[in-house]
Amino acid sequence: MSFEIYHFITSYNYYIIIFLMISGLFIVVSKGNMVKKLVGLALFQTSVYILYISPGKIVGGTAPILADGYTIYSSPFPHVLILTAIVVGIATLSLGLSLVIRINEEFETIEEDELFNNELNDE
Amino acid sequence: MALTTLGIIRLRNLFSVVILSTIYSFLMATLLLIFDAVDVALTEAAVGAGISTVLMLTVLYYTKMNEEKPRYRSVLPLIICLVVGGLLIYGTYGLPPFGAADTPIHTHISVQYLERSINETGVPNVVTSVLASYRGFDTLGEVIVVFTAAIGVLSILKRDKV
């Protein structure tokens, strides 16, 4: 039992990540509005950022910029990966948003339900 | 942070949703700062809170401000999310505790980078040296992704039909 409590205290960062991840997933799955879906996707993405970065932190460590007087640095490697991920994230987001604009031009709506209804009425 | 997330789920006015996501991005940048990831925090503040907000507000200008009421109750998505959440919590039992220094992430390749980068590249900021020097090809690929996305956006939004 003591292991359970220890584990719960030492891995609270994972619970934050899981909460954010689940809310992002929930928005993506349940909301019909496309802009909101993209916001949810961004939310999911940022939760993955902390999933990568938080294990790289050492308590008592400092940022990985070499300087005199510091010996413990947090791991620089996840930071590099996530920098790339942020930039790729904004690229996909802009592509998705441009698709939303195009859909709105064509069908006059950004709601999934209305799009399905339009298709059904057309047939 | 949790409050802004719940706000994003509940609110129907898309303008407030976008502003809340900006606030969320700033909170995220603060959190990254606490995790010693200064470079990532800067990028997140500039990209997540700056550029994303501008893009989303532009889209809202071209489309609609309000979200329609959902037609179906969201029970099934909730169940899916709870199941996935349970699995993820089960997964945390295999992960190392927070803040420890003897985990694989600190003993494998990071040490090499931290020890060698000042001699081999002469840059005190290890993140920069890894990004631009050791993993330069990754960064090149990233530039290609951004370029492709730009081409995609331009071709989707092209007004004149061929």
Image (spheres, grey):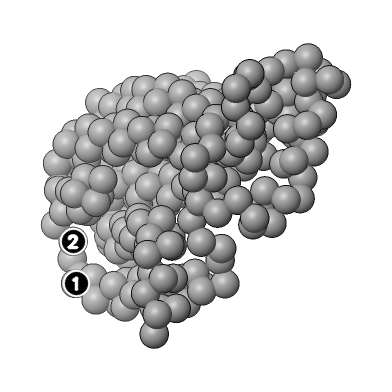
Of residues B150 and B154, the one drawn nearer to the viewer in this rendering: B150
Of residues B47 and A53, the one drawn nearer to the viewer in this rendering: A53
Q: Which mark is residue A64?
A: none
Residue found farthest to the front: A69
Which residue type carries mark 1?
Answer: Arg
Of residues B29 and B21, the one drawn nearer to the viewer in this rendering: B29
Q: Residues within 10 Å of mark 2 (few under 14, many from 20)?
A: some
Residue designated by label 2: B70
Give the alpha-carbon distance from disc 2 to disc 1, as whole Å. 7 Å
| SS label for mark 2 | loop
Which percent across, then down, holds residue A7? 44, 71
> Would residue A80 appear left or right of B109 to someone viewing this image?
left
Would you say residue B109 is visible in this rendering?
yes
> Would residue A27 appear left or right of B161 to someone viewing this image?
left
| Identity of the residue drawn at 42% across and 22% down | B46
Can you say whether B132 is above or below A31 in the image?
above
